[in-house]
Image: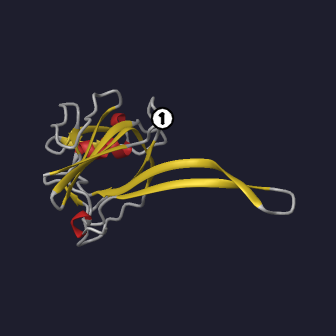
């Protein structure tokens, strides 16, 4: 039977919903335990929020005569897309441009270098607040696979739109989601 109490909107955790840590960091296994000190919160995300895309491509196998008799999955991929809008945050820039390409801080001078060096993978945690529940999405091994255009426009925040590809962990899982009533 349908239950409207199970209908919800995905709102960010107050204080920032997306955090990163070096891969290999101990990961949370529930929706509420405080994150370890290695996790860095990346601050505000644009009002567009978070989009998760799951791609499952398959190939149809046909029998003589043209009937489809089997399908075989040929691709699986999970991506998470969002826009980080704290453009003056050194931690945000390190994730977007690479740790070794960002030096200093805003008080003493922040230098960011753009180059073709491959970006580091991170462990990602995304904390969500639902109606009467909280949820945590954990990507053990996620890598920025795409960075969108950055616009410098009067009246709009400068933001870095990123797509993170969730790669399989040692158990073959791309992400885990933990949800509990509050």
Outermost residue on the front side: it is 1
Up-down: is 126 above or below 30?
below
The quadrant of the picture occupied by the N terminus is bottom left
Q: Is residue 77 left or right of residue 103?
A: right
Seen from the viewer's position, the closer of residues 96 and 182 is: 182
Which residue corresponds to the image point at 41% horizontal and 61% vertical from the top-left? 149
* Coloring basis for residues: secondary structure
Image quadrant assignment for residue 100: top left
> x and y percent of residue 105 in the render?
19, 41
Seen from the viewer's position, the closer of residues 115 and 38 is: 38
Image quadrant assignment for residue 87: bottom left
Outermost residue on the bottom side: it is 155
> x and y percent of residue 172 in the render?
48, 35
Q: Number of marks in the image?
A: 1
Pointer 1 residue? 172
How many C-alpha atoms fall within 10 Å of the one at disc 1: few (<14), some, or many (≥20)?
A: few
> x and y percent of residue 18 in the render?
26, 48
Q: Is residue 67 left or right of residue 7?
A: right
Image quadrant assignment for residue 112: top left
Q: Is residue 161 visible?
A: no
Which residue corresponds to the image point at 24% horizontal and 65% vertical from the top-left? 8
Seen from the viewer's position, the closer of residues 32 and 144 is: 32
Seen from the viewer's position, the closer of residues 176 and 77 is: 176
- Per the image, label 1 sits on a secondary structure element best described as loop
Q: Is residue 13 left or right of residue 67?
A: left
Outermost residue on the right side: it is 64
> x and y percent of residue 162 in the render?
39, 53
Up-down: is 171 above or below 15?
above
Q: Is residue 104 visible?
A: yes
């Amino acid at each position: 039977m349908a239950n409207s109490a199970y209908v919800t909107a995905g709102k960010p955790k107050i204080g920032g919903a997306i955090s990163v840590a070096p891969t290999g960091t101990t990961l949370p296994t529930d929706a509420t335990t405080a994150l370890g000190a290695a996790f860095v919160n990346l601050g505000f995300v644009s009002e567009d929020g978070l989009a998760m895309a799951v791609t499952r491509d398959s190939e149809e196998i046909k029998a003589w005569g043209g009937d489809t008799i089997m399908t075989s999955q040929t691709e699986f991929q999970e991506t998470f897309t969002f826009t980080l809008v704290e453009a003056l945050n050194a931690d945000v820039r390190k994730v977007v441009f690479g740790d070794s390409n960002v030096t200093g801080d805003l008080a003493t001078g922040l230098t960011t270098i753009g180059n073709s060096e491959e970006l580091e993978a991170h462990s990602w945690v995304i904390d969500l607040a639902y109606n009467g529940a909280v949820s945590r999405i954990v990507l053990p091994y996620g890598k920025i696979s795409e960075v969108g255009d950055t616009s410098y426009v009067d009246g709009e925040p400068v933001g870095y739109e990123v797509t993170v590809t969730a790669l399989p962990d040692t158990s073959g899982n791309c992400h885990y989601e933990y949800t509990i009533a509050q």
